[in-house]
Amino acid sequence: KAGVTQTPRYLIKTRGQQVTLSCSPISGHRSVSWYQQTPGQGLQFLFEYFSETQRNKGNFPGRFSGRQFSNSRSEMNVSTLELGDSALYLCASSLGGEGEKLFFGSGTQLSVL
Amino acid sequence: DAKTTQPPSMDCAEGRAANLPCNHSTISGNEYVYWYRQIHSQGPQYIIHGLKNNETNEMASLIITEDRKSSTLILPHATLRDTAVYYCIVRGWTTSGTYKYIFGTGTRLKVLA
């Protein structure tokens, strides 16, 4: 069974640009959640999608948005990039029920110059 | 939001048991305790989770105190490949009735040859 796939693996952008990251969950998983990881702040929850609906949201500005498609694949978009957005962005999938474990992808390393 | 507190680092001799503590004194009755580990910029890997009872699987054991305010992850025979950052996580419920994962700062475990 294929794991969680994130593309691209590395990305370099400049301030003010926007970026879209992609996440393909494990087959059959309906929940996809996104996390930002930086050396200073650690792992922080961005948002979670379940059956194409945003179910949970962390404390990030509106520049961070996401969506989920009918096949459960998810995209995350960051507009008007800032230097502080440089981070490892991780997505995780699960069946979405209570007590379910998350399966993480390898992440997208975003560098904003 | 339920928070976790972990020691920033620990060392363990290869072949010995590694006992990683976590404090989650504000945990609510229906919140699970999860443990994940992350090896150098890869996505976190699920280890184990529990609600009230102690749990064991092929990777580790999870001991949760009776009052559920703390837990200990036990790696029975640590190997060099267990060197990683270990995260204790409480799956917290928001006031709107949804949930999100709250990651602590983790414990950097170094297994020594």
Image (cartoon, rainbow, N blue to C red):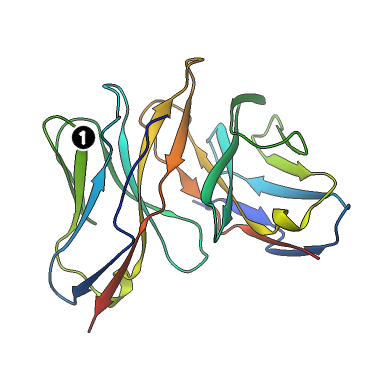
Does residue B19 appear to the left or right of B30 in the view shown? left
Q: In this view of the protein, which residue sits in the foreground, A39 or A23?
A: A39
Residue B20: horizontal and vertical position, in percent?
Answer: 22, 56
Q: In this view of the protein, which residue sits in the foreground, B29 or A93?
A: B29
Q: Looking at the image, which residue sits at the far bottom?
A: B113
* Secondary element type, mark 1: loop
Query: Subunit of mark 1?
Result: B
The image shows a total of numbered marks equal to 1
Does residue A13 appear to the left or right of A90 in the view shown? right
Q: Looking at the image, which residue sits at the far right?
A: A16
**Is any part of residue A26 visible from this angle?**
no
> In the rendered structure, which amino acid carries the disc numbered 1?
Lys
Mark 1 crowdedness (10 Å alpha carbons): few <14, some 14-19, many ≥20: some
Residue B78: horizontal and vertical position, in percent?
Answer: 20, 69
- Residue underneath mark 1: B69
Q: What is the quadrant of the N terminus of chain B in the image? A: top left
Residue A86: horizontal and vertical position, in percent?
Answer: 70, 59
**Is any part of residue B40 visible from this angle?**
yes
Up-down: is A24 above or below B112?
Answer: above
Question: Which residue is drawn at the image coordinates 53% and 35% (left, top)?
Answer: A28
Give the quarter of the image for residue B31: top left
Q: In this view of the protein, which residue sits in the foreground, A1 or A113?
A: A113
Give the quarter of the image for residue A111: bottom right
Does residue A22 appear to the left or right of A57 in the view shown? right
Question: Which residue is drawn at the image coordinates 67% and 63% (left, top)?
Answer: A9
Up-down: is A105 above or below A54?
Answer: below
Residue B93: horizontal and vertical position, in percent?
Answer: 42, 23
Question: Which residue is drawn at the image coordinates 20% and 43% (left, top)?
Answer: B71
Q: What is the quadrant of the C terminus of chain B in the image? A: bottom left
